[in-house]
Image (cartoon, helix red, strand yellow):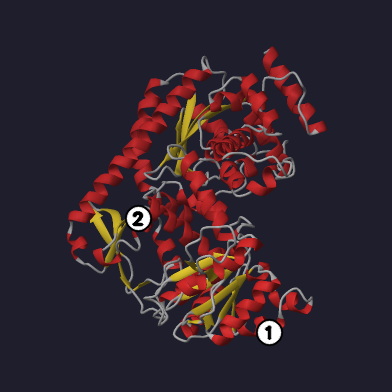
Amino acid sequence: MRQDVDSKQVWEYFLENESVTKNNDLKEEIIASWHFCRKKEVDPFNGIANEILDTSIFEQKLKENELLLQLAKPHIKQLTDFLKGWRYMTTITDRNGYILFEQGERTVSYEANKINLTEGAKWVESHVGTNAIGLALRLQKPISVKGYEHYSKASQSWNCTAAPIFDQNNEVIGAFNISSLYRSINYDYILACVQLATESISLSWKKQIEQDIEFMKKSKANQNEDSILCTFNGIICHLPNKLLPEYKNYINRHITNLSRETNLTKTQPHIPILKNKRIIGYQVSVKIPEKKNGIYFKGIKGTSSSFQHVLDLVDKVASRNTAVHLFGETGSGKEVIAHAIHDNSRHMKGPFLSINCGAVPESLMESELFGYEAGAFTGANHQGNKGKLELADGGTLFLDEIEEMPKSMQVQLLRVLQEKSVVRIGGKKAIPLDFRIITASNQDIRELVKQGKFREDLFYRIYVFPITIPPLRKRSEDIKYMIHDYFRKNDWFPNWQHRLEEVFEKAEWKGNVRELYNALKRCEILYENEVPSYQELEALTSVIDSHSEHQSEDETYSFTEQLELQKIKEKLTRRAGNVSAAAEELGMSRATLYRKMKKYHL
């Protein structure tokens, strides 16, 4: 009884002060949930479910979750028989917290009806306050909520334990819950029972889906080579050969992603596939439309209108010998576009040579571009060498960060472009050239010309056909295609890719495409065998903001240290700053973690 009094005092203190007393036994998840409920303006003095589905919608819910209920009910019966006399009730909810099924002793069900803990009611934190069902679904882990740990008064006479149920892709599809009006003899025991039940249901689900997929692949439905097969809940399980390997990464994803993200369109309604009178999947016929342009492009085309416009410009200019200037932020893919222009031009069989004008020291720039004759440098035993201009003959020369080229070199480059020939350093003979020049900058060189920082005469030579490449934040709909491209190239297909896409599509990506691929590489290394939380994925998208403000200009971390830093930050975020809990997850002592936090200025 004393513990109940203490818990009630903590709850009352929180309502008044929006914080908890220092000496309390509440779990971190409960405290965080109270804050969540407060933010959602849940009434702590009520908590009776106010959203209950009408009959027709509830019947539809039952139909949608037919397999879940079919697999769960044997476990419910087993537990109900086992706990008979303990005055418990069991419930099954869908992924959104709607109660699909409830069963319990009459007196317990009678009390449950008073707070609408009944079939059709939505039982989540934002509706009824802190509760085991809502927490299990949101946190995706088993949890118990007892007495005054419930945020709202209506539930405070109850003790509840719930755990999530997962599908074949480890996505939550529902929750299993046991509730009682009386103090449990052993909460840990009840939690173990619930967890064991949900694990068994999840395993049964995966086995059933595997059997259904195998049945569909062997059935007549698979004989139509224009059809995609998906499970009853829309998860693609088979693609016809002509869609492989280009669309391989859509297997185990929902069919709506394919229609939304690609040019594939349905040619007829979904055809149900039946097994023992149960719909186990659908056959979906699709049509592949003709491509809008015929350019060869090694990168990811995506679907954004801004990048499709870039590809249309590439298509128009590639076949001509026109000088092209690319403008875009660092990492936006300027060299990829330059390659596309080269690959679709008459110079495609010639070399593609690239030089970053900002990376070559001014003292070496001249010899790098123009080459030199033997003996051109006093006191050195040079045998002579071709420069990039000469080596690019018959192909394409790509000059990145052209704005960084010294003015003395700008004059000499202008002469080469005018005369279409080059003279090596120390030489006298003009060597005729035939190459295409593509330049790029991450600054607007028109402004540099106005400021006198770039030669106007060279500007007019290279700025014939400008193409502006949009930053990744302005073509976020293309991010999913880049993610899928990374999966395919690295033969890595995590079953939590939906979560990855959801987080990455909202990120700012200041480093554009280059930063995105770097984040994917870190993600693969860190979470090859585990599922990251949303917070951990968000941390991967903010590398610059995360610690640059603490890091001095001369302080750099090795790649291994960066990975370690990222891992520590993610665990601390997941555990809301609890060092002990984070250290346990990281497999290190509390003292070691504190030492590393000091090292990384956390």
Q: Examine the image and state in which quarter residue 360 appears.
A: bottom right
Q: Is residue 302 visible?
A: no
| Left or right of 521, for residue 271 | left
Q: Which residue is mark 2?
A: 251
Q: Position of residue 541 (x, y in %)?
A: 60, 49
Q: Which residue is mark 1?
A: 457
Report the quarter where the N terminus lies: top right
| Left or right of 215, for residue 474 | right
Q: CA distance from mark 1 to mark 2?
A: 54 Å
Residue 61, compared with residue 132, is above or below; it is: below
Report the quarter where the C terminus lies: top right
Q: Position of residue 513 (x, y in %)?
A: 55, 60
Residue placed farthest to the front in the image? 379
Residue under the point 55% across and 82% down: 323
> Between residues 471 and 11, which one lies in front from this camera angle?
471
> Between residues 163 and 349, which one lies in front from this camera angle?
349
Q: Residues within 10 Å of mark 2 (few under 14, many from 20)?
A: some
What type is the residue that disc 1 sits on? Asp
What type is the residue that disc 2 sits on? Ile
